[in-house]
């Protein structure tokens, strides 16, 4: 096999790092445009709340499946080669989303865009390959910060672009930026040498079965409100879901190089982290989905009649809080331990969810609630990833953290789909506006489920301060 010569440390300059930063901004913006404009998309494409929930999570599901595969391919074929091919898929997905005339085509575009989740870790691999340790840490921080900045830009710009031009342009503009950044990375970044050869290869059967499990689970949750009219369809999907889940479990237990090593779940530190991550992300996803819907409810009902532009501004403080949560969690874990940080985050989130259920008559109620939930989620998830990574051997870090990643996506996906199902079930026949009680029920259920996580945190050892 022909390999390229590995560039010596320090060979890339600021232009190459800038190209990676531009790529991070573009992908961050492309990832974030759906959330503030979801009510607008539901109106234009005649989607039910459950279908809107499905649209908001397919990108994350693809990302959870693609990321571990991208990492293995990066080791085998070189980070740059894989990154360019991954971004080609993302750009095609962005163009499909931009040109989509209906929901099925838009879902296809979002599925392809989900490959972007694997782009950021590959960017970090390239930075570490071509820069000395001190400079690489700075560069990784810059790229990470620009990804968050891109998400903020997407949240703010999606509404004005969709309302001023069209929904097609809110996908097209960040896609054009991603295409330009990918071309620049391809020109400015030197090739990196594959670092190892994985004889076991990629766990394709496990990947396909996990894909089937996740997709079927989302369909079951989406159809749940219509169980009375489609009982046989729903029953058949439940049987298919059980078959996929059983087959995936069997394959992963026997695979030489499993996509997700289920044996790792036997370790208390790992399974507790996974349970907590699932519950916390399920609780977080409820307000993430419900708040834009509540902002968009007409003001002559019980909502605020907010436009997509206004919704983006209302959600921005929560995005800022999420970006600050990571560093705060890291400092807290070092000083007080992960258990203290997770417990604090759970209490904060439960308080915010109860507050949203009880008081949501003013815009500031929702904005503050979103800020508290975003901050609490960032505290908890960062602490759980840190705890998981430091509780296993160095050689098991990737396997353990991949389990947390999969449960994070599962928790978020289940929470969003359940929220969509609640709104769909709570929408009177002949009306497009869900009953206000649907939002109250959603927030209350999320608060109860999140509070149950405290039962798990009580069993966690206080541990040493990390």
Image (cartoon, rainbow, N blue to C red):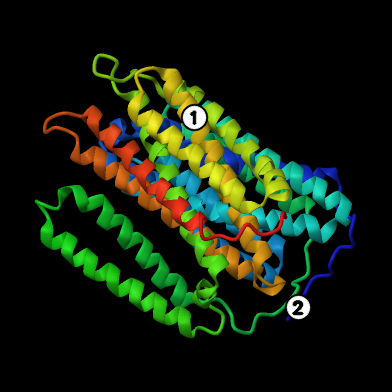
Task: Reply above or below: 47 against 358.
Answer: below
Helix, strand or loop under label 1: helix
Quick one: quadrant of the N terminus? bottom right
Residue at the spot of label 2: 2
Residue 379 locus on image (x, y percent):
59, 44
Residue 388 locus on image (x, y percent):
61, 62
Choose mark 2 or mark 1, whichever is in front: 1
Furthest residue to the top?
Answer: 300
Q: Is residue 161 left or right of residue 192?
A: left
Residue at the spot of label 1: 158
Residue 280 locus on image (x, y percent):
46, 49
**Is any atom of residue 73 visible in this view?**
no
Residue 177 locus on image (x, y percent):
62, 39
Residue at x-position 27% and y-position 37% = 441
Residue at x-position 54% and y-position 69% = 268
Q: Nearer the viewer, residue 415 or 151?
A: 415
Q: Nearer the viewer, residue 201 or 285?
A: 285
Disc 1 residue crowd, few under 14, some 14–19, many 20+, Cα 10 Å: many
């Amino acid at each position: 096999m022909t390999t390229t010569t590995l560039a010596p440390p320090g060979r890339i300059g600021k232009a190459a790092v800038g190209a990676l930063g531009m790529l991070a901004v573009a992908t961050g913006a492309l990832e974030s445009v759906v959330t503030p404009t979801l009510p607008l998309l539901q109106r234009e494409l005649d989607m039910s709340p459950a279908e809107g929930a499905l649209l908001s999570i397919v990108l994350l599901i693809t990302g959870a499946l693609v990321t571990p595969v991208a990492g293995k391919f990066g080791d085998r074929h070189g980070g740059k080669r894989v990154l360019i091919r991954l971004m080609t898929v993302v750009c095609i997905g962005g163009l499909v989303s931009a040109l989509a005339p209906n929901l099925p085509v838009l879902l296809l575009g979002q599925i392809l865009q989900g490959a972007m989740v694997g782009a950021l870790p590959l960017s970090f691999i390239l930075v570490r390959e071509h820069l000395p340790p001190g400079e690489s840490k700075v560069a990784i921080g810059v790229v990470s910060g620009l990804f968050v900045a891109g998400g903020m830009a997407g949240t703010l710009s999606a509404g004005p672009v969709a309302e001023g031009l069209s929904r097609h342009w809110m996908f097209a503009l960040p896609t054009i930026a991603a295409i330009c950044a990918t071309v620049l990375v391809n020109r400015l970044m030197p090739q990196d040498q594959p670092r190892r050869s994985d004889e076991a290869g990629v766990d394709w059967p496990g990947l396909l079965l996990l894909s089937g499990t996740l997709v079927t689970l989302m369909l079951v949750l989406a159809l749940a409100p219509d169980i009375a009219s489609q009982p046989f369809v729903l029953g058949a999907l439940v049987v298919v879901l059980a078959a996929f889940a059983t087959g995936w479990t069997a394959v992963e237990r026997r695979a030489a190089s499993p996509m997700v090593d289920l044996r790792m779940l036997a370790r208390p530190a790992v399974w507790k982290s996974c349970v907590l991550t699932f519950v916390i992300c399920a609780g977080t996803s409820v307000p993430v989905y419900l708040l834009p819907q509540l902002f968009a409810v007409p003001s002559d009902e019980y909502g605020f009649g907010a436009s997509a532009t206004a919704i983006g501004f209302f959600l921005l403080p929560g995005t800022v809080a999420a970006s600050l949560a990571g560093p705060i969690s890291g400092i807290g874990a070092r000083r007080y331990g992960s258990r203290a940080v997770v417990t604090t985050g759970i209490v904060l989130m439960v308080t915010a969810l109860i507050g949203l259920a009880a008081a949501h008559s003013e815009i500031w109620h929702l904005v503050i609630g979103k800020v508290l939930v975003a901050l609490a989620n960032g505290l908890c998830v960062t602490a759980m990833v840190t705890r998981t990574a430091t509780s296993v051997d160095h050689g098991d870090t990737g396997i353990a953290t991949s389990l947390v990643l999969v449960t994070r996506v599962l928790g978020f996906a289940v929470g969003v789909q359940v929220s969509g199902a609640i709104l769909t079930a709570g929408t009177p026949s002949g009306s497009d506006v869900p009953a206000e009680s649907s939002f109250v029920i959603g927030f209350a259920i999320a608060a109860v489920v999140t509070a149950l996580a405290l039962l798990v945190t009580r069993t966690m050892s206080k541990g040493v301060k990390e």
